[in-house]
Image (cartoon, rainbow, N blue to C red):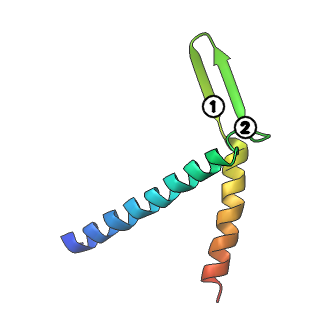
Amino acid sequence: MDLSTIGRVMIFGALGLLVLGGLFVLLGRFGLTRLPGDLSFQRGGLTVYFPIGLMILLSVVGTIILNLFFRR
């Protein structure tokens, strides 16, 4: 692989992370931060949060969108 190919992969990866970050900001503004199925554990000064419900929702939406774009 030459450097131009690696550069393109890095640029598209960064753009993908930018879109994903924007999606998370929008979901937070719509109040989708705590969904049923999300696990949160607190003990002392430590809080551990597993957004399982949000990940399932994003997976379903992403699957539908990708199927619409890449269907032959």
3 lies left or right of 68: left
Q: Above or below — where is 9 with respect to 18?
A: below
* Rendered-image quadrant of the C terminus: bottom right
> Tag 1's secondary structure?
strand
User: Going 38% across and 67% down the picture, which residue do you hit?
Assistant: 12
| Label 1 vs 2, first from the N-terminus | 2
View extreme (top): residue: 44
21 lies left or right of 1: right
Residue 51: tell me if it is visible.
yes
Amino acid under label 2? Asp
View extreme (left): residue: 3
* Rendered-image quadrant of the N terminus: bottom left
Crowd class of label 2 (few under 14; some 14 to 19; many from 20; radius 10 Å): some
For the residues bearing labels 1 and 2, Cβ distance under 8 angstroms: yes
Looking at the rendered structure, which numbered label has been put on residue 38?
Answer: 2
Snapshot quadrant of residue 70: bottom right
User: Going 70% across and 70% down the picture, which residue do you hit?
Assistant: 64
Q: Position of residue 57 (x, y in %)?
A: 72, 54
Identify which residue, 54 or 27, lies in the foreground: 27
Q: Position of residue 33 (x, y in %)?
A: 67, 41
Q: Position of residue 9 (x, y in %)?
A: 34, 68
User: Going 26% across and 67% down the picture, which residue do you hit?
Assistant: 7
User: Going 66% across and 49% down the picture, which residue do you hit?
Assistant: 55
Say which residue label 1 marks.
49
Residue 2: tell me if it is visible.
no
Total numbered circles: 2
View extreme (bottom): residue: 72
View extreme (right): residue: 36
